[in-house]
Image: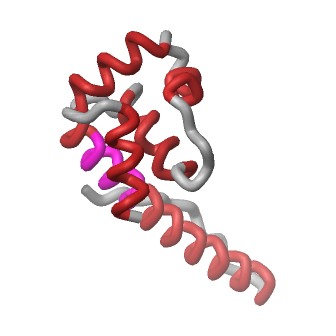
């Protein structure tokens, strides 16, 4: 999937050309980042089947695995009751929350 971000070049002074160069570089970086985000979300969707709740919780876990994360904290991140979150997490990932967190820590 390719994304294009466009803007109009007006030409002109050297400061305008420097600004245009900066904007083109920024545009390229934004396109690259957007593609990476989409690829990550697709991967999470394939793994979990739900990129808006469990996928978000997994991203939270990946960013914070070195901290002391509890089931309640992760459930709170996606505004769910911890019991419901736990059962949905297991259903979507095939792992309990604790086992998934242990697996994540070992892999990292």
Q: Position of residue 36 (x, y in %)?
A: 38, 60
> Does 11 appear above or below 87?
below
Question: As drawn, is 51 to the left or to the right of 18?
Answer: left
Q: Position of residue 17 (x, y in %)?
A: 69, 84
* Residue 30 coordinates in the image, percent (x, y): 52, 62
In this rendering, the count of numbered labels is 0
Residue 69 covered by magenta stretch: no
Using residue 19 as the reference point, say whether residue 43 is left or right of it: left
Q: Is residue 33 above or below residue 42?
A: below
- Whether 42 is among the magenta residues is yes
Residue at 56% from the left image edge and 61% from the top image edge: 7
Image point 75% across, 79% down: which residue?
16
Q: Is residue 34 above or below residue 13?
A: above
Q: Quadrant of residue 41?
A: top left
Q: Is residue 8 left or right of residue 11?
A: left
Q: Quadrant of the C terminus?
A: bottom left
Q: Dominant secondary structure of the magenta stretch?
A: helix
Who's the residue at 37% across and 60% down the image? 106
**Where are the magenta residues, as a range?**
35-44
Q: Quadrant of the N terminus?
A: bottom left
Q: Position of residue 74 (x, y in %)?
A: 52, 30
């Amino acid at each position: 999937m390719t994304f294009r971000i466009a803007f109009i070049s007006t030409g002109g002074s050297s400061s305008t050309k420097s600004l245009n160069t900066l904007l083109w570089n920024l545009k390229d970086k934004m396109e690259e980042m957007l593609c990476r985000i989409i690829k990550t979300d697709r991967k999470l969707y394939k793994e979990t089947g739900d990129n808006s709740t469990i996928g978000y919780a997994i991203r939270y876990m990946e960013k914070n695995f070195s901290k002391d994360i509890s089931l309640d904290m992760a459930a709170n991140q996606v505004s769910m009751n911890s019991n419901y979150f736990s059962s949905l997490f297991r259903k979507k990932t095939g792992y309990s929350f604790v086992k998934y967190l242990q697996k994540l820590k070992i892999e990292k």
